[in-house]
Image (tube, grey):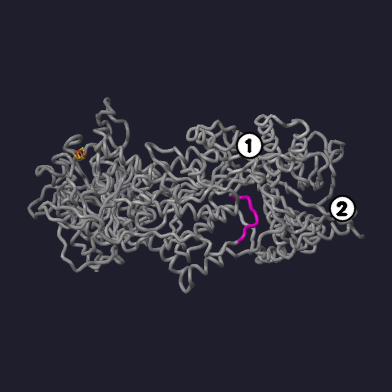
Amino acid sequence: MAKQVKQLDRVIIRFAGDSGDGMQLTGDRFTQESAAFGNDLMTLPNFPAEIRAPQGTLPGVSSFQVHFADHDILTAGDSPDVLVAMNPAALKANLPDMKPGTSLIVDSHDFTARNLTKAGYADNPLEDSSLADYALSVVDLTGMTVEAVKEFGLSRKDAARAKNMFALGLLSWMYGRPIETTLAFLEKRFAKAPDIRDANLTAFKAGWNFGETTETFAVQYEIKPAPMSAGTYRNITGNLALAYGLVAGGVQSGLPIFLGTYPITPASDILHELSKHKRFGITTFQAEDEIAGIGAALGASFAGSLGVTSTSGPGIALKSETIGLAVMTELPLLVIDVQRGGPSTGLPTKTEQADLLQAMFGRNGEAPVPIVAPQSPGDCFDAAVEAIRIAVTYRTPVMLLSDGYLANGSEPWRIPELDELPEIDPAFATGTNHESVDKEGNAKPDFWPYLRDEETLARPWAIPGTAGLEHRIGGLEKGDGHGNISYDPGNHDYMVRIRQAKVDRIADSLPPLEVDDPSGKAKVLVLGWGSTYGPIGAACRRVRKAGYDVAQVHLRHLNPFPKDLGEILKQYDAVMVPEMNLGQLSLLIRAKYLVDVVGYNHVRGLPLKAAELAESITDLISTTTGTLDHDVHQEEVAR
Amino acid sequence: MTTTELPFPGLSGVPTTEDKLTGKDFTSDQEVRWCPGCGDYAVLKAVQSFLPDLGLRRENIVFVSGIGCSSRFPYYLETYGMHSIHGRAPAIATGIATSREDLSVWVVTGDGDALSIGGNHLIHAMRRNVNLKILLFNNRIYGLTKGQYSPTSEPGKVTKSTPAGSVDHPFNPVSLALGAEGTFVARTVDSDRKHLTSVLSAAAAHRGTALVEIYQNCPIFNDGAFDAIKQPDTKADAIIPLVQGEPIRFGVPQEDGKGSKGIVRSASGGVEVVQTADVAESDLLVHDAHADDPSTAFALSRLTDAGVLHQSPIGIFRQVQRPTYDDQAREQIVTASAGQGDQRQALASLISGGDTWTVV
Ligand code: SF4
């Protein structure tokens, strides 16, 4: 049967099922196929904190959303065009995100009385008219999978487990995805279990063939490749890009990386990845707790490695005292916080940006720490390299603020050429730097560990094994220059100020901010940081498409702020700061620049939605300029 | 060869020097600021005069401490040093020792630092057997915070924070170390320079974590806590000397010059104190710190009074070989790096791994 082929510019698909149904894998494979095809894309995995939440229940639903397009896109999409639901709970949990007219592909197999009750359905939604507003396709995916793989003699349970590959095959047909990467992947993944491998391959192909032959699906869709700048690309998650950034920072600085860490969601993948790359001289130390993780990392830095520790918000709380010690001892140290919903244990698998103030101020005393934040999954690579540059150059702990969305989300990433990476010079101290007078009044060459570089205000980094530079450092206040314990009031005041001045000095090394204001006529600026880059960018595009002017600036450096930020803020009549917290950057901006920014704050554990944000931006434009015909334009913006 | 002979396996990989260094070379220009009469002075002197014997380059020695009176130690030594934060010295030292085979790494800590706030790091360092020498100054009191009871204070102790007497049961640091899989566990006394030095030498020679508990008098807040083992009239009955290969005897010497008391295996499987007159010489327990099974060492450690100290075994309880964490971690890196080419090329191929596509 010849099928109709329809052109689309972009599609958002969400695969949803029980957390044991392999939805993350399914989504990931579809993503790889789309990447290989050349679409631009962004993904949003969403899974429960429990490894195996009760089967068939709403809390046990796991989903993976992929947005792919023939043009460049910035987010994983607000609401899906297509929902693939593997059971009643997956349908129920995700239906609220589906707009009328969107497509539902539902595996009917699990819609039994028992499973319907578990999901909280009184009646079977596939049989009453409750889904009438949607383009509903009901297919017995499980039944067809079991039928297709019966020749391999698997148990019914094992056979049914291949249903995710059947679904993937069907969707791959529907959107004309190249299937080679998935075939190769299955061959490799199940190489040790030939019958499972063959069942998965067969289910995948059966799904594809079903799409081609069935009358249930009359249309095949085509989404052309997106134009991208020249280069070699791969799809990459934030945690992987971050780990690669650490490897790169080690190579660029010539320093061995020492990761001292303790497993925590959603940061553990950084440990897993780095532990595979010992050939780069990388040591990974899984410590007894968060405190030992950072302690060992700081010890390694003292000894001449680049100490790194990775964690999420609750772990940062435990590491605070050691970060303070790193501030006092002025040693390079990278502290990675993959933020998740808080406070306390909070929402371990969900995203949030609510650790900014903890990163900024979460220590006793005046303890300034530079803060760097990546803006997209691929950008985690560059952000990690940048954080290492600052840590090594300025002899300071640096906080790298990723988040759960960046960590697990993915996008095509243009693989950088190595010459694009900065050179990082550890510039270890090799000789004495001062002339002291001994007890007999004779001059003698001496090493002063707190004598600073005039340009960076960094102190010398003299590592054990260097003869003649033996010295002691610690958490007690240091005397300026010589670094011995000092309780002198004037010295303390000076040292507090010089530590702050050193961090402020980093701003001298930062490039000017990029202001995205295509018309140059914007009166409203949207200022963001971290993973909200995508939703803010997408929202600004919508606003501009509807005919209005808006400017966007995104901060990579949260401490110190870039030098030109103050001037830029002054150029706009209103500034909006969207964040996944209750206004932490807003607070900092207000305090520092006395600009009365307008917050846009959601803390739902999910990325901001571009359409909603666009409406709020338009509102702000309208109240600022007082010129908009509000209702008409809102409709346009929200489209 | 015994482990106390040179070259020390515990120090293999640490560069040595031909220069004849002295205690003075290891003395920094900082004024020592402990209270007059503090036991810490004696330990500092012993360490300063013992370090040159190791024949190591001074710049390859690192002392790390936590917080407490004894943790000021690194400031007074002309080596590399870090006075860190409360309880965390073993963790910081683990990073130093793991990342650098060529350093001799020492931890100086106290009963509050090591056993209270830092208990977790202490036990895990011993479990991993990181190549660290941990000197645990036990004065059975909090000195720096001015006199609260510590995790080794005797039950009932009246202090500023326990006016009605402490109801905490104390740790026995040696028992704890043995339970934590420690491979070298010893106890010595601040005032016995000779014994202290011999234990430090053996600790330095040990490859792995060496835990040395040092009974240290705090004349200000807990004066006389160890008097029983220091006073000439009580000492013989209080110190149970552990000497490798020797039957364990103590107490006032008899005509044969040997102690009137001894240690034998008890019927319950532990050990007990007997009058040597009541048993045959051959029934006495011969001390064997090298025994694989730590049960006897543990049983010996239980002869220490938990309350006011009247009796305590002194010496090396356990000294066995087990691969160290840091050696193995470095070995994995060496294996992974063997025969691998240029790092930049490897980085380029790492980041361009996986499914890629090219846009022209
Ligand atoms: S308080 Fe006690 S332990 Fe501390 S320095 Fe004084 S005497 Fe020594």
> Which of the image's four quarters has the N terminus of chain B?
bottom left
> Where's the C terminus of chain B, which quadrant?
bottom right
Looking at the image, residue A159 sits to the left or right of residue B161; the answer is right
Chain letter for mark 2: A
Q: Which residue is mark 2?
A: A217
Do badges 1 and 2 share one subunit?
yes
Q: Mark 1 — residue?
A: A523
Q: Left or right: where does residue B353 sit relative to residue B64?
A: right
For disc 1, the neighbor class at 10 Å (few under 14, some 14 to 19, many from 20) is: some
The residue nearer to you, when weighing A151 against A385, is: A385
Residue A114 visible (yes or no): no
Residue A413, magenta (yes or no): yes
Q: Residue furthest top?
A: B164
- Determine the residue positioned at 55% across, 45% down: A555
Span colored in magenta = A407-414
Q: Is A129 above or below relative to A43?
A: above
| Structural crowding at the residue carrying mark 2, measured as other residues with C-alpha within 10 Å and reported as few (<14), some (14–19) or many (≥20) | some
Residue drawn at x 57%, y 62% is A416
Q: Chain of mark 1?
A: A
Q: Position of residue A69 (x, y in %)?
A: 74, 53
Q: Is residue B339 visible?
A: yes
Ligand 1, seen in the image, is in the quarter at top left
Q: Does residue B127 show up magenta in the picture?
A: no
Position of residue B224 measured from the top left corner of the image (x, y, whole percent):
16, 38
Q: At label 2, which amino acid type do we have? A: Phe
Q: Residue furthest left?
A: B255
Residue B108 image offset from top left, x and y in percent: 27, 49
Locate residue A71: give its quadrant.
bottom right
Is A35 displayed left or right of A482 in the figure? right
